[in-house]
Image: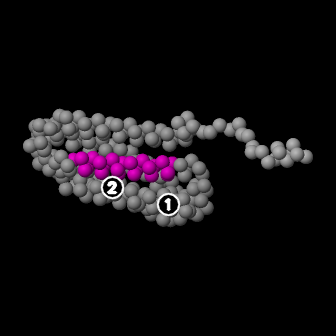
């Protein structure tokens, strides 16, 4: 009896090893997204450094930023808010709100593209393309690369919005929402869109400080 009680009182020994945060299994799509975010961040950081090194003697020739860029900054901030609300609505099974906020995000995405194009047209009309120098070239490079990220995001927003409209009834929307891959796609896309918004803010503040 004493031995049995001793065994029951003694702490359990487990052979389960502690999970190493560096070697634990990760969600492949999420890991790929983080790699893409890290790669884009490294790319833009390299451009910033090269820009500072090559244009420190050209500060007298730096141009004023188009007004359209200021408006597009507000638009991208609002789009992050609407997509966040869409994500919350999807998680809480408020599917009508999800469609409304997702559509609003898509509309704001198109507005951002148009405002960026308007900013480029404003620079073209002022004759910036004629005799372009290093500082002006980097404006097109930075805004063009960021616009490429936005175009990818808007393309995927169109896909998500079509899915949301197609699953209009509550039953179809519920079946779509409880599917783990669908939840994962929306979650990862929300992260990607927030990254593009933060990336534009960094680019915009960087250009403001220099121009």
Q: Quadrant of residue 77?
A: bottom left
Q: Position of residue 13 (x, y in %)?
A: 73, 40
**Residue 47 position (above or below residue 170):** above
Q: Specify the farthest residue to the front.
A: 2
Pointer 1 or 2: first along the chain: 2
Determine which residue is flagged by label 2: 76
Q: Would residue 150 be seen by someone viewing this image from the given angle?
A: no
Task: Please give the name of the residue rendered at 14% of the width and 41% of the height, measured from the top-left corner.
Answer: 129
Q: Quadrant of residue 3?
A: top right
Whether residue 192 appears in magenta in the rendering, the answer is yes
Q: How is the image coloured?
A: one colour
Whether residue 43 appears in magenta in the rendering, the answer is no
Task: Please give the name of the residue rendered at 11% of the width and 39% of the height, measured from the top-left corner.
Answer: 58
Secondary structure under badge 2? Answer: helix
Measured Cα–Cα span from mark 1 to mark 2: 19 Å
Determine which residue is flagged by label 1: 88
The magenta-colored residue range is 185-207
Q: Residues within 10 Å of mark 2 (few under 14, many from 20)?
A: many
Q: Position of residue 188 (x, y in %)?
A: 48, 48
Number of marks in the rendered image = 2
């Amino acid at each position: 009896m004493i031995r049995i009680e001793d065994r029951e009182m003694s702490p359990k020994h487990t052979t389960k090893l502690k999970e190493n945060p560096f070697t634990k299994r990760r969600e492949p799509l999420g890991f790929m997204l983080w790699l893409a975010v890290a790669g884009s961040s490294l790319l833009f950081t390299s451009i910033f450094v090269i820009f500072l090194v090559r244009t420190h003697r050209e500060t007298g020739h730096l141009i004023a930023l188009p007004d359209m860029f200021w408006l597009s900054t507000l638009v991208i901030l609002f789009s992050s808010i609407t997509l966040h609300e869409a994500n919350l609505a999807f998680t809480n099974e408020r599917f009508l709100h999800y469609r409304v906020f997702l559509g609003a995000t898509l509309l704001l995405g198109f507005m951002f593209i148009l405002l960026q194009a308007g900013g480029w047209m404003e620079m073209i009309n002022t004759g910036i393309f004629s005799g372009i120098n290093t500082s002006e070239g980097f404006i097109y490079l930075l805004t063009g690369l960021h616009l490429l990220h936005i175009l990818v995001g808007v393309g995927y927003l169109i896909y998500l919005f079509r899915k949301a409209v197609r699953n209009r009834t509550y039953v179809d929307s519920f079946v779509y929402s409880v599917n783990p891959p669908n939840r994962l796609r929306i979650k990862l896309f929300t992260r990607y869109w927030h990254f593009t918004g933060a990336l534009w803010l960094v680019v915009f503040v960087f250009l403001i400080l220099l121009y």
